[in-house]
Image: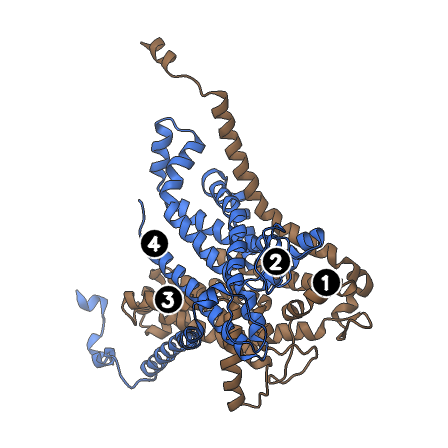
Chain colours: A brown, B blue
Amino acid sequence: MTSDYETKIKSRSGIERGLETGFYWSAKILAFAIAAILIWITIQVAREAFPAMREFGLGFLTSSSWNPVESNYGIVPAIYGTLVSSFIALLISVPIGLGVAIFLSEDYLPPTIQRIIVFLVELLAAVPSVVYGLWGIFVLIPFLKNISPLTGPGMLPAALILSVMILPTIAAISRDAIINVPGGLRQAAVGLGATRWEAILQIVLPAASSGIIGGIMLALGRALGETMAVTMLIGNANKVDFSVFAPSNTVSSLLANQFAEASGLQVAALMYAALILFAITLAVNVLAQLLVTRIQKI
Amino acid sequence: MTSEFFPNQSNMNFDPASLKKNPSSPRTLFGLFMSGVAGLFTLMAVVPLFIILTYLLQKGISSLRWQVFTELPPPPLVPGGGFGNAILGTVIMVGIGALISVPIGVMAAIYLSEFSEGKLADWIRFATNVLSGVPSIIIGVFAYSTIVLNTKTYSAWAGGFALAILMLPIIVRTTDEALKLVPQEVRQASIGVGANNYQTVLQVVLPAAIPAIITGVTLAVARAAGETAPLLFTALFTQYWPSWDNNLAEPTASLAVLVYNFAIVPFKNQQELAWAAAFILVVLVLLTSIISRIATSKRTY
């Protein structure tokens, strides 16, 4: 009997075993390729930026001229525009996004309608950024000109469009964080006599805070790197102007505008700017990821 | 018995009426106010979508004619024309992007969900998330320096390569999620009847996850079709049809870059084409989003 089985069950053929290990290793190598791409991007951009780094050093970060004729480059106005536009966008979209997250995680609406609204808010993130830019040029800017001292493209329309674009990120991740707060916490609060909003503000939001902050940082990362809509609306003036109605510039719009026509040291300077933007967004994103993955472990 | 637990009950200044909800107490009013604010904010979040969609519908449909799908972009102030070359260019570049990113992304996700051991997989998932946060313009810069500088020409290949990097994290993440939804018992059953790991993955697990993977890929394709920044200086733009004689190693038009180029010029006829192209892009994105939503709500297991 035993010998009968032994003859019938053959060990796997060499080809089969080869396929098995081959499949395993190709999957493994391709998975590592993703991490490798991240490193590759860093090295490549840094290498191209090297001539500019040698030429300008850290002075690049403190100079505000961008003069291809005299080969004089500095990034202060672009950094200023990037930070200010993102900051204004956050100022608008954080309260609204949190409001949406709370409204859509409570029982104000029947679940079906809730799901539809969640989907609609997500769709905002799916609209291509160049379409936001187009809409901004032909609808938002003319509208703002009528009601404010704005005279053309500038910081305000760019920041407003940015706030619409990052709203879904904040709303969706905050909602996830709020929904993931254990129900017992809220029940305990209500049991002690808290009203709905007392429970939300004092119990639920603090418990969900790491996820919410992570979502805000992800949105910040998106706002800092957003290119097309901002390039089309901000006016691309390479100077620091503290008025929100004045045209400004961001690192990404600098790249979008000048890269195709640049040559020599200007390319290196643009690569240097790209490297700085990459470093900032990378830091923001890594922090955000660490915070967001923490909610899944509560 | 009761008096043991509630001594001096009769002496307590307790008014049962205070347990009732007081409609004019500051706490109630505050709650009502905050609910109103949250509802208002939700309305404010949805309104921009509808405003943008209405404008796109109005302006986009009125500029849509049959010629836009077949003809070349017109010079300034010349009526007529279309963006057939941009549609073809977008299809080619997104196709190249998908051809590169789908095999890599799916295999990477298979490793993550089927073969990986703990910490390492977490790190790769982390890297995937970080990669999806890299600004698309940086990916354009990267593709420029790796491909355009080395081949000394703008090309559809460089554009497709940039789009592939953008699509990769989306594909990895959706495939990873899809594979995780396949129950463990299915794998055990497959191993139990004597299948190898690769047989289990390719013949049992992947087929079960295929609908979700395809929706992930469609979503990635729709996103990539709307991306402009990575194409600006990798594929550039051209007024002409993509040429196969050159093996696509020349500037290539795309819908997204066309919208950008024609939005910032003062010529009415080109602006109208920009609206038409934007309309097509948004319809593409909306359709894929809605279809994927419907498709993922059905599960094999």
Which quarter shows the C terminus of chain B? top left
- Residue type at mark 1: give it: Tyr
User: Which residue does the numbered mark 4 point to in the structure image?
Assistant: B295
| Secondary structure type for disc 4 | helix
| Secondary structure type for disc 2 | helix
* Marked residue nearer the N-terminal end (2 or 4): 2
User: Which residue does the numbered mark 3 point to in the structure image?
Assistant: A118
Between marks 1 and 4, how big is the CA–CA gap?
Answer: 44 Å
- Residue type at mark 3: give it: Val
The mark lying in front, picked from 2 and 3, is 2
Q: Residues within 10 Å of mark 2 (few under 14, many from 20)?
A: many
| Towards the viewer: B79 or B56 | B79
Evaluate if marks 1 and 3 touch, with contact meaning CB atoms under 8 Å apart: no
User: Which residue does the numbered mark 2 point to in the structure image?
Assistant: B139
Looking at the image, which residue is at 49% across and 49% down?
A: B172
Between marks 2 and 3, how big is the CA–CA gap?
Answer: 30 Å
Which quarter shows the N terminus of chain B? bottom left
Residue A43, image x, y percentages: 69, 52
Q: Chain of mark 2?
A: B
